[in-house]
Image: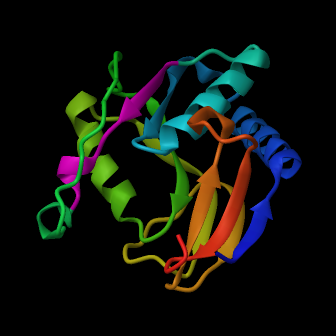
Amino acid sequence: MQKKLILDSKQLDITLSRLCQQLIENHTDFSNCVVLGLQPRGIFLAELIHQRLKSLKVTLPLGYLDATFHRDDFRRRETPAKAHETRVNFDIEGKDVVLVDDVLFTGRTVRAALDAMISYGRPAKVELLVLVDRKATRDLPIAADYVGKYVDTLDSQKVLVELEAQGHKQNKIWLINKSDG
């Protein structure tokens, strides 16, 4: 399997710090802000962001959002999609919501998340934070407000995010060929 390292553990640490600083710059008062990690992999990044903000004395609600049944390809898959836990123990009505996902690819997951999120109230504003933005791969006109790294990719490639929180030895982000992964 051919892998190309996009971010190593040290670079990822710096990237996470930068993303948190950007959030602080744009949300000086987090009293009206919540974070929603997108299931299944965005929750790990959301937890890392939440922990870092907490260490900087910023407290805000954190939830997990599953958009499986809101996807436009839900019934088109050969194998049924597996739903994950949704945990939104707070109202998002009138709140500034920061959606967090690991990789922005076609935009379809984010579109589905916007639909799923409405079940918990109508937010005042929605922002998107992603660790990796696969440039020029969008099927829908969706763009992230906060991006850790922009990566040019081919359709035959995928971005593999390995985080310690997922059981990996080190935090690393890879670019691999789909046929290999």
Give residue 84's quadrant in the image. Answer: top left
Specify whether 117 is left or right of 45.
Answer: left
Specify whether 13 is left or right of 141.
Answer: right
Specify whether 142 is left or right of 19.
Answer: left
The N terminus lies in which quarter of the figure?
Answer: bottom right
User: In the image shown, does 34 or 151 lie closer to the viewer?
Assistant: 151
Colouring convention used in this rendered image of the protein: rainbow
Relative to 98, residue 11 above or below? below
Which residue is at 17% across, 60% downward?
A: 74
Relative to 4, residue 66 above or below? above
Relative to 23, residue 131 above or below? below
Which residue is at 63% across, 60% downward?
A: 132
Residue 123 visible in rendering: yes
Which residue is at 34% across, 64% downward?
A: 108
Residue 99 visible in rendering: no
Q: Position of residue 3 (x, y in %)?
A: 70, 72
User: In the image shown, does 158 or 87 lie closer to the viewer?
Assistant: 158
Q: How many marks?
A: 0
User: In the image shown, does 170 or 116 lie closer to the viewer?
Assistant: 170
Q: Position of residue 62 (x, y in %)?
A: 49, 23
Give residue 163's quadrant in the image. Answer: top right
Q: Which residues are magenta?
A: 61-71
Relative to 114, residue 178 above or below? below
The answer to if 52 sits in the magenta stretch is no
Which residue is at 33% across, 48% downward?
A: 113
User: In the image shown, does 161 or 69 lie closer to the viewer?
Assistant: 161
